[in-house]
Amino acid sequence: MRRNNLMKKFFKTILSIIIKIDDVIAFVEKLILSLVLSVIIIVLLVQIVLRNFFDTGLFEAEIIIRHLILSICFIGASLSTYYRRHIKIDLINRLVSDKTNKILMVFNNIFCAVVCIWLAKAGQSFLIDEIEYGGSLASNIPLWIFMLVIPVSFSIMAFRFLLNIFKKFFLEDI
């Protein structure tokens, strides 16, 4: 009995450390999100002023903005997984018992994690191809830098879906 309690305490401690790491990742994601959104707003404002008053504009600004918006979407999806605010269908959850609901949650999170891992691997292949054969944007910015967000965000989402399972079983109070 004592050994079982020690194991449980050990898993809770490890899980608490992993949750703290996830909190740090989420904090960094929020910072990046704020920074990227600020850059988008500044570049767009400069572009508007340059076009309206000086009949010129920033070279390839729209293309860079498109890639930054794509980054915002992926980081936002990852953060929505952190807050468990992603799209989900709750119809079945309301009709079944708590025990069945817990089992469904496990299968749902495993399925979502597997899909995210598969998409992360596809994003990694795309990134590798982009590094090998890809071009660059204005001022020789490699295009692959903007594509890095795809495998990274899907990997973080897979991690978070799996973490949700462990939270449910070991840390009901968190």
Image (cartoon, rainbow, N blue to C red):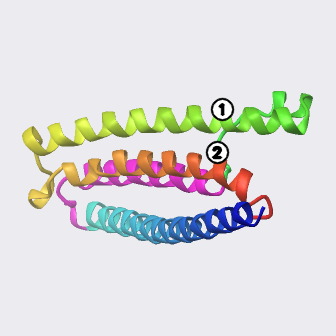
> Are dots 2 and 1 in contact, CB under 8 Å?
no
The one nearer the camera, 65 or 173, is 173
Q: Is residue 79 magenta?
A: yes
Q: Quadrant of the C terminus?
A: bottom right
Residue occupied by mark 2 = 86
Relative height, residue 65 to residue 173 (above, below):
above
The residue sitting at 42% across, 67% down in the picture is 32
The amino acid at mark 2 is His
Relative height, residue 122 to residue 172 (above, below):
above
The amino acid at mark 1 is Phe
Q: Within the image, what quadrant is residue 132 found in? A: top left
State which mark lies toward you, 2 or 1.
Answer: 1
Q: Quadrant of the N terminus?
A: bottom right
Q: Within the image, what quadrant is residue 44 found in? A: bottom left
Neighbor class of circle 1 (other Cα within 10 Å; few <14, some 14-19, many 20+) is: few
The residue sitting at 57% across, 46% down in the picture is 162
Residue 49, image x, y percentages: 32, 67
Residue 73, image x, y percentages: 47, 49
Q: CA distance from mark 2 to mark 1?
A: 16 Å
Relative height, residue 144 to residue 123 (above, below):
below
Q: Which residues are magenta?
A: 54-83
Q: Is residue 41 magenta?
A: no
Q: Main secondary structure of the magenta part?
A: helix
Query: In this image, 164 relative to 62: left or right?
Result: right
The one nearer the camera, 137 or 169, is 169
Query: In this image, 151 relative to 60: left or right?
Result: right
Residue occupied by mark 1 = 107
